[in-house]
């Protein structure tokens, strides 16, 4: 029987390293599809690889987790699992992007305060990232341990851009990791939040 923690731990390791599936697969000398199987919970890494992945994710302190996110050039946030609008730490990539557009108040929010107040006063709140986070937070599967991750398409209001995001729970840290990138689809596909349960992904690989 496959350890139920495999999808969470593998995905967490990959996101903390800021790697794509292909890059993570190359790091461990396996096929891209193998990493996808690990993240879907239908295959288990071999013992040596599993030990390395667990050492990276579970052996590190929360301070190390925060530092890995903080120094990333990618768009990442580590947030409170009980309040997804409450940041713990933001990546260098996000802060630099916000500073570039003069969103100093949002940078301050990312340094410890909640960042939902400004979004609520916006005419675009209904398509905002804050609304996406609140929608996910309200999903009964979020804290029930039934969600592997969530895919989100929304607008990051301070940057004025539509993004594609993935939000992955880190239940052992009482946190969640958000990773996002500008979306090529823009506004055309509209706002959506798609929680993905383990049962939705098990069996998609041969």
Image (tube, helix red, strand yellow):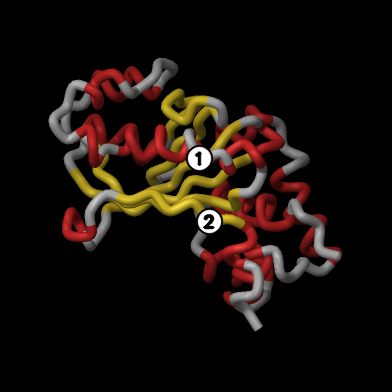
Badge nearest the viewer, 2 or 1: 1
Position in image of residue 4 (x %, y %): 76, 55
Residue 139: numbered disc = 1
Counting from the top left corner in percent of width and height, residue 78 is at 51, 34
Identify the secondary structure beneath mark 1: loop
Rate crowding at label 1 as few (under 14), some (14 to 19) or many (20 or more) other CA atoms within 10 Å: few
Q: Residue 196 bears which disc, if any? A: 2
- The reply to whether residue 70 is in sight is no
The part of the image, by quadrant, that contains residue 140 is top right
Mark 2, Cα crowd under 10 Å, few <14 / some 14-19 / many 20+, is some
Q: Position of residue 61 (x, y in %)?
A: 71, 31
| Quadrant of the frame with the N terminus | bottom right
* In the image: residue 191, left or right of residue 11: left
Of residues 61 and 41, the one nearer the viewer is 41
How far from the left and from the top, in percent, is residue 69? Answer: 51, 38
**Circle 2 SS class:** strand
Q: CA distance from mark 2 to mark 1?
A: 11 Å
Query: Residue 120: which quarter of the image?
Result: top left
Residue at 58% x, 43% y: name it: 141
Left or right, 40 with reference to 180: right
Q: Is residue 75 above or below residue 202?
A: above
Q: Is residue 56 above or below residue 60?
A: below
The mark tally for this picture is 2
Comparing 106 with 61, the one in front is 106
Residue 176 horizontal side relative to residue 158, left or right = right
Residue at left 29%, top 35%?
Answer: 96
- Which residue: 59% across, 76% down? 204
Please report the residue visible at 65 percent of the width from the left and 68 percent of the height from the top: 202
The answer to whether one can see residue 46 in this image is yes
């Amino acid at each position: 029987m496959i350890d139920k923690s495999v999808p969470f731990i593998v995905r967490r390791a990959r996101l903390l390293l800021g790697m794509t599936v292909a890059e993570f697969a190359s790091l461990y000398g396996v096929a891209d599809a193998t990493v996808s199987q690990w993240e879907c919970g239908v295959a288990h890494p071999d013992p040596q690889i599993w030990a390395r992945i667990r050492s990276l994710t579970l052996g590190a302190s929360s301070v190390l987790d925060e530092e890995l996110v903080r120094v990333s050039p990618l768009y990442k946030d580590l947030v409170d699992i009980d309040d997804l609008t409450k940041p713990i730490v933001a990546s260098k990539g996000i802060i630099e992007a916000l500073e570039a557009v003069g969103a100093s108040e949002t940078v301050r929010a990312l340094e410890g305060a909640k960042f939902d107040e400004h979004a609520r006063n916006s005419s675009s709140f209904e398509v905002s990232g804050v609304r996406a986070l609140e929608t996910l937070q309200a999903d009964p599967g979020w804290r029930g341990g039934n969600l592997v991750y969530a895919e989100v398409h929304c607008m990051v209001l301070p940057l004025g851009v539509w993004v594609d995001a993935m939000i992955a729970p880190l239940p052992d840290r009482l946190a969640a990791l958000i990773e996002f990138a500008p979306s090529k689809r823009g506004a055309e596909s509209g706002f959506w939040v798609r929680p993905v349960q383990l049962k939705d992904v098990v069996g998609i690989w041969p």
